[in-house]
Image: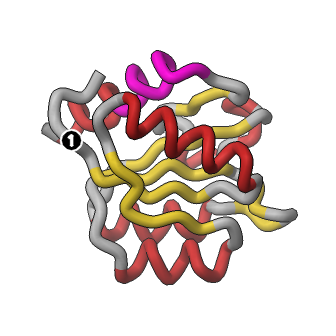
Amino acid sequence: MAERRLRVLVVEDEMLVAMNIEDMLLELGHEVAGLASRLEPALSLAREGSFDIAMLDVNLAGEQSFPVADILAARGIPFLFATGYGIKGIAEQYRDRPVLQKPFRSRDLGEALGKVTHAVD
């Protein structure tokens, strides 16, 4: 689990799932710094937002979130994917990033955040 309070950008198109993720993040001692449920707002937040880490659902209402990952990678902001598709649904260039298989538990989320933050600490 991450030892510091993280500001997390959550990119998730299912509102109930997003609310559940927010609850988990709060339970883990982190905060949601931004929430986007569609690609265009996610791109805007990725370009201009202030956060420590991002969690990306791969499929956003039929559009893939990899353009968001591209911006985050260019900015040097760590991120992970949360998807029901597993590693097979991840673009080749991002298969080294942590992937949370949906559905996941709070403990799984904490471990994934820890992996991402330790990789950049």
User: Residue 86 in the image: x percent, y percent?
Assistant: 72, 30
Residue 88: percent from left, percent from top: 75, 34
* Quadrant of the image containing the N terminus: top left
SS state under label 1: loop
The residue located at (31%, 58%) in the rendering is: 77
Q: Is residue 119 above or below residue 17?
A: above
Q: Which residue is depicted at the point 41% across and 55% down?
A: 32
Total count of labels: 1
Q: Is residue 120 left or right of residue 100?
A: left
Give neighbour class at mark 1: few <14, some 14-19, many 20+ (Cα, 10 Å): few
Residue 34 position (above or below residue 22): below
Image location (x, y in percent) of residue 49: 35, 75
Name the quadrant of the C terminus.
top left
Using residue 11 as the reference point, say whether residue 75 is left or right of it: left
Q: Is residue 106 magenta?
A: yes
**Secondary structure character of the magenta stretch overall:** helix
Q: Which residue is more in the foreground, 27 or 66?
A: 27
Residue that sits furthest to the top in the current view: 107
Q: How is the image coloured?
A: secondary structure
Q: Nearer the viewer, residue 115 or 22?
A: 22
Choose between 51 and 23: the one closer to the eye.
Answer: 23
Residue at 50 percent across and 19 percent down: it is: 108
Residue depicted at x 30% and y 27%: 114
- Is 34 magenta? The answer is no
**Quadrant of the rendered structure where residue 117 is?**
top left
* Residue 56 locus on image (x, y percent): 57, 52
Q: Is residue 14 left or right of residue 4?
A: right
Q: Which residues are magenta?
A: 105-113
Q: From the image, tell me which residue sits under label 1.
A: 5
Q: Amino acid at mark 1?
A: Arg
